[in-house]
């Protein structure tokens, strides 16, 4: 578990608030942010309108070296809301930032949401109800991840490209709640991920070696954490009524970005698979990687339902991620074949 590098001056106010409510504080919401001034306000505002009593939860905002006006926006909410605090984490990376929030958390359960998302008004009440009423008691609780837009969508862009769901019925993932890699990867995004504080402390928090860092697009920190959690606490509860809405900006609605993201998701998953498998199974892992990359790219293309001639030309002009993927897989296979 990492430690925060420095903390906001509001720490003393938070400690007083937490001490006054130590016996009833249940949930700690952790929001890691980097240059999120254009959208973090909507995220924070959603936690001023929760159906759950504000004395039962705290909101911890971790600024990871923002250079825009994020700090000012966060300060406004800290001054306005007694259960809001801010923390600074100087080491760059979402893993460091989230772990700083975990260290600061005083609730029994820690909830993670991204700075470009916002929570349904019943989100925290539903999360607390799941942790305290579902039997057997879950280690992790998650729900649906739905898109919202502030700009118009291209005619071919569908919501299905951005929705993360495990269906319309509340249930434990897989038989007896044991989580599968694919369910973790697509069904429990880090922006709608709630875990018992005792469990996340025990397993050591998020890895700081993987995941987004500043402007770098990387994935995998959530599935890596879930894999460690599932080894000892395999009860993951899914409830479709626990909804988080995430922003889909215009740059994310281009064929180039979709293909790049699909490639990065598949490559991150393949890296995770290779960490888990022994040397004798590496060729199987590489094969699974190639299949998964192909499926993700195919899904991207299927999502673009009706191509005009211009759209086809645009798609063909952005095939670089596919070329990179094939080249990287080829290099990996040559390396391992050479070692064999």
Image (cartoon, grey):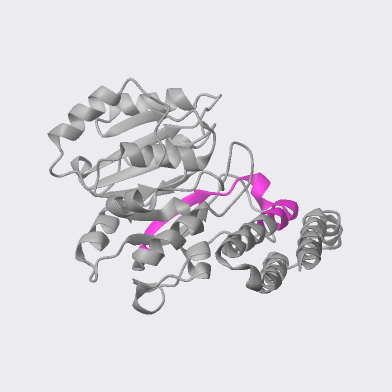
Of residues 227 and 53, the one nearer the viewer is: 227
Which residue is pictured at 59% across the width and 65% down the height?
273
Q: Is residue 260 magenta?
A: yes
Q: Is residue 257 left or right of residue 29?
A: right
Of residues 154 and 32, the one nearer the viewer is: 32
Which residue is pictured at 52% across the width and 27% down the height?
65
Give the quarter of the figure containing the N terminus.
top left
- Picture coordinates of residue 175 (x, y %)? 38, 79
Which residue is pictured at 47% across the width and 45% down the height?
114
- Picture coordinates of residue 225 (x, y %)? 45, 55
Q: Is residue 232 left or right of residue 315?
A: left
Q: Which residues are magenta?
A: 238-261
Of residues 86 and 163, the one nearer the viewer is: 86
Give the quarter of the figure containing the C terminus.
bottom right
Q: Is residue 265 visible?
A: yes
Q: How many marks?
A: 0
Of residues 133 and 101, the one nearer the viewer is: 101
- Picture coordinates of residue 179 (x, y %)? 43, 70
- Picture coordinates of residue 96 (x, y %)? 47, 38
């Amino acid at each position: 578990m990492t430690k925060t590098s420095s903390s906001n001056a509001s720490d003393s106010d938070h400690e007083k608030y937490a001490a006054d409510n130590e016996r009833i504080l249940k949930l700690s919401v952790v929001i890691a942010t980097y240059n999120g001034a254009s959208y973090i306000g909507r995220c924070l505002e959603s936690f001023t309108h929760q159906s759950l009593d504000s004395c039962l939860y705290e909101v911890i905002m971790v600024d990871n070296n923002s250079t825009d006006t994020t700090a000012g926006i966060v300060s406004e909410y800290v001054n306005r809301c007694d259960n809001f605090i801010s923390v600074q984490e100087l080491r760059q990376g979402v893993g460091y930032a989230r772990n700083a929030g975990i260290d600061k958390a005083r609730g029994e359960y820690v909830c993670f949401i991204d700075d470009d998302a916002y929570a349904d008004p019943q989100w925290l009440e539903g999360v607390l109800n799941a942790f305290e009423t579902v039997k057997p008691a879950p280690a992790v609780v998650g729900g649906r991840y739905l898109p919202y837009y502030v700009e118009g969508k291209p005619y071919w862009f569908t919501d299905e490209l951005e929705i993360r769901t495990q269906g319309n019925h509340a249930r434990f993932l897989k038989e007896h709640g044991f989580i599968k890699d694919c369910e973790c990867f697509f069904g429990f995004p880090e922006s709608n991920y709630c875990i018992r504080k005792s469990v996340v402390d025990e397993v050591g928090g998020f890895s700081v070696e993987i995941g987004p860092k500043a402007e770098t697009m990387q994935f995998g920190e959530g599935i890596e954490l879930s894999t460690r959690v599932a080894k000892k606490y395999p009860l993951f509860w899914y409830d479709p009524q626990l909804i988080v809405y995430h922003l889909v900006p215009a740059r994310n609605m281009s064929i180039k970005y979709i293909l790049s993201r699909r490639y990065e998701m598949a490559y991150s998953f393949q890296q995770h698979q290779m960490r888990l498998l022994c040397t004798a199974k590496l060729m199987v892992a590489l094969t699974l990687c190639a299949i998964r990359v192909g499926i993700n790219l195919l899904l991207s293309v299927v999502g673009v339902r009706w191509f005009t001639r211009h759209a086809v030309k645009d798609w063909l002009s952005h095939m670089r991620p596919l070329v990179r993927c094939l080249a990287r897989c080829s290099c990996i296979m040559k390396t391992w074949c050479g070692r064999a």
